[in-house]
Amino acid sequence: MPLARLAKRVFTSDETLNAQIEVAHFGAAPLKDAATSWKLVADNGSTLASGKLDAKDIPVDNGIVLGKVSVDLKNAKTPAHYKLVVTIQTAAGGAKLAENDWDVWVYPAQVSTETPKDVLVTSQLDEQAEKQLQSGGKVLLTLPLESIRNFTNAPVQLGFSSIFWNTAWTQRQPPTTLGILCDPKHPALAEFPTDFYSNWQWWYLIHRAGALRLDGLPKGTEPVVRLIDDWVTARPLALVVEAKIGKGKIIVCGFDLTGDLNDPVSRQVRQSLLDYMAGNSFHPKTEVNLEQLRNLAAGG
């Protein structure tokens, strides 16, 4: 089995992807003169970079170093998802013995910090935000974890990993959620490449996020990004939700996107949401009132 040691999975276009390629081989006998090749492939099938490592004999052992991969990402399309694919063959052009791949994401080294004129970005639903909505404006409300209303009994304890075994048996040992669910083709995520489930890029958001309660919003509210609750409680939760309120429109996030964002994932998801809100496709279906919005925040 080919193995790759990567320091991280998220990169910017001014960085270099470095990986040490290894192999675990527990077959019946050593492999003679095995050939190893690699490529960095985009979702559309195009290859950004590729190469071959020196052929070598592979003993029956674990963690055998085959060589190193280095890719300058300056020519990478961004934002984009790629796969680093490593293939081992019996010899150059011979039968394929094994192949493995790893997801990586490449984001722009810089993104615009400007906010569309008709969008207010805030971390609290205060008088300014309410006036913005009442006047027909748009609000991106990005709530810090400590500002989100939780459940009094059986609080949601968010984590990037899924629950351990069963919270009914572990006294609700955190985390108590099972990842996310979203539509990758939703226009709000057009500039934030994602699968319909949580993958490594979501760690940057989820590890500091809180769950938005949907039970106080109109029944049938479909969030942009849903959080899957523990099956014991099975409550409707969200990470990102959109709504219209009177003449105004709002997106609420369960993580803060104000201030200086120190990771490329947070910067990119903010840019994707803002461009969506500034465009012609921002038409939330759910209609809410101010009281329902206030209920999303602690003390609401």
Image (tube, rainbow, N blue to C red):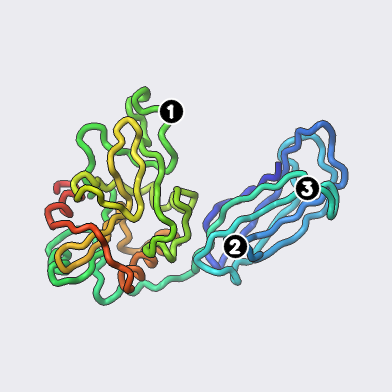
Which of the labelled discs sits on residue 42, or is there none?
2
Q: Judge by depth and name the residue closer to the eye, 264 or 94.
A: 94
Residue 58 drawn at (x, y percent): 81, 41
Residue at x-position 21% and y-position 47%: 219
Identified by mark 2, the residue type is Ala
- Going from the N terminus, do you reach mark 3 or mark 1 first? 3
Q: CA distance from mark 1 to mark 2?
A: 35 Å
116 left or right of 245 in image? right
- Which amino acid type is shown beneath numbered disc 1? Trp
- From this view, report whether residue 12 is shown above or below residue 195: below
On screen, residue 96 versus residue 115, left or right, reads right
**Crowd band around label 1 with a 10 angstrom C-alpha radius: few (<14), some (14–19), many (20+):** few
Q: Is residue 22 above or below residue 105?
A: above
Q: Where is mark 1, residue-wise?
A: 165
Mark sitting earlier along the chain (1/2): 2
Quadrant containing the N terminus is top right
Query: Taking the image as drawn, is residue 176 in sight?
Result: yes
C-alpha distance separating marks 2 and 3: 22 Å
Which residue corresponds to mark 3? 96
Image quadrant of residue 125? bottom left
Question: Which one is nearer the viewer's eye here, 129 or 292?
Answer: 292
Q: Residue at x 29, y 33 (%)?
A: 233
